[in-house]
Amino acid sequence: MKISLNQDVVGRLEFSQKPVEEINGKITKWEANDTAYLVSDSNPKSLVGFCVKVGKTKKTYILQRRHGAKVFQIQIGKTSDFTLEDARKKAGEYAGELAETGKNPKEVEREIETAELTVGECFRRYREYLVNQPCKPTTLLTLDKCLKKLIKWKEIKIKDLTSKSILDRFDEIAAKTPTSAEQTFTWAGSSINYCLKHEQFEAKKAGRTPSLTINPLEILKIENKFRSKKELEAAYEAKGIRKPLSAKDTLGPFLNACWSKRPDNRTGVDFILCSLLWGTRKMEASSLRWRDSLTDKEAEKASYVDLKEEIIFFFDTKNGTNLKLPISKAVMTILKERNEMRVDAITDNGRKWVFPARSKFSKTGSYSDGNSLLKYICEIAQITKRASHDFRRTFGGVAEGLTSYKMVKRLLNHHDHNDMTSRYTAKEWSDTIEAQQKIELHILATAPVVYNALLTPTYPPLPIIAGNPEKNN
């Protein structure tokens, strides 16, 4: 349909109906419509091929132009962003560029834009991508912290980053905190790679050479700036961090010391024991609610303990999937006792959280800060301080010696994002129950006092040697 366009006509065009008759610049007839359509401008002021494309959600000025054997459809912009006169002028500019270069001017603009990308813009685009995944708030926080470490590079173009400047900045950060340097440049590399992939896709689609072909941060790998696994383990050993408890010498003393503090801090000790026997991350255990405190709708997006079904459900774990675990025997003893304690709770937090915060001023309402208790337990056990994440490493180490690699991945929720980790076949669930119970027994057997308190009479008690606590570890 050709119409002599004016601003009023452009404003009246709608997706639901299209013009089919025009007299002296006025639309006299419309018909119902359900597909996108073009209206060509017959006004003498316009170039041949200047049109308005009317879609379901937007109207766009475009220029259809032939150059050689190829027909180009050049998008000028939305009608809400351009006046009709400005769009006509822009169409004239694009027509001239097309005649001169033989390339779609919009593609040339994108090519130039990509070549001018700055470090800060790459971080911004990658952050926007992560937000739409969606991702964890901690991930965005980490990304923002990494950009701050490179704040002087924010306006520097990717193409202008030199190998020397990259290596010097990495060494500058690594001299104080090697881990921070590795993390900062890993995230920066991911941000730049994200933009590179987009540019390569656009270039291939347009049949041109990409304006950016390599990530300049690759020089860090060429120069072996990132520590190897062996070097990392040596660094952790030197700092006394990332140390799982050993069934041979530290696990038993730790459990005995932990159990001795239970009368003084029931919630804190139960939290530590369950975290160890589940192999979960700190915040995953902290977020657990009682299933009967949730509506069915709330339970779709919450972590909970269901004593009736004998399951623990962790919603949206670190890798973005859900995890369902069976409740093993010792854990069931702990949870049943905690459930009975809810009757005496005087606050809503005490009734709905499996591990409620001790302070009524807690922002979350759930237990989360056990650092001082953990430090004290390690002192009693006479072992070096452990972090809460060392429980996960302990669980994983025990699991590796007792069950299959596939089962270890399942229990620790090291799954692909495509796996439905909250669903199992009957056989898988039966195997999971068996493996979980086997690991629990092995861990608690290092401390007969704790084993007997939580597992008898379900299992025969282990012998306790009076006067020799080391033998009970």
Image (spheres, helix red, strand yellow):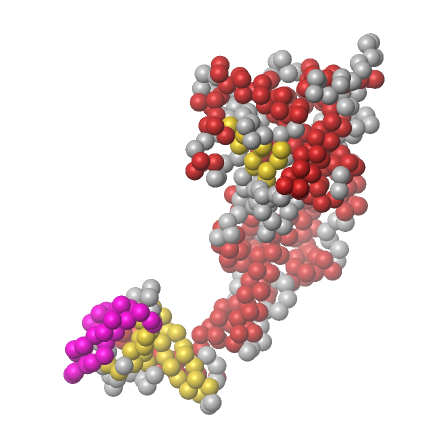
> Where is residue 361 drawn, in percent x and y?
46, 23
Looking at the rendered image, the quarter that the N terminus falls into is bottom left
Q: What residue lies at 51% left-to-right and 28% top-to-bottom?
A: 290
Residue 416 falls left or right of residue 79? right
| Foreground pick, 436 / 376 | 436
Q: Is residue 124 left or right of residue 43?
A: right
In this view, 168 is above or below 356? below
Query: Who's the residue at 82% across and 27% down the image?
Result: 248
Q: Name the residue located 46 percent from the left edge and 73 percent from the top edge.
A: 109
Q: Magenta stretch? A: 7-36
Q: Does residue 31 appear left or right of residue 288 in this picture?
A: left
Could you say where residue 358 lies in the image, as x and y percent from the top left?
53, 20
Q: Name the one closer to the observer, 78 or 35.
A: 35
Up-down: is 330 above or below 237? above
Q: Position of residue 149 (x, y in %)?
A: 59, 48
- The residue lying toward the viewer, choosing from 348 and 437, is 437
Residue furthest top as drawn: 467
Identify the image quadrant of the C terminus: top right
Is residue 422 inside the magenta stretch?
no
Visible residue check, residue 319: yes
* Residue depicted at 48% across the width and 25% down the height: 352
- Is residue 23 part of the magenta span, yes or no? yes
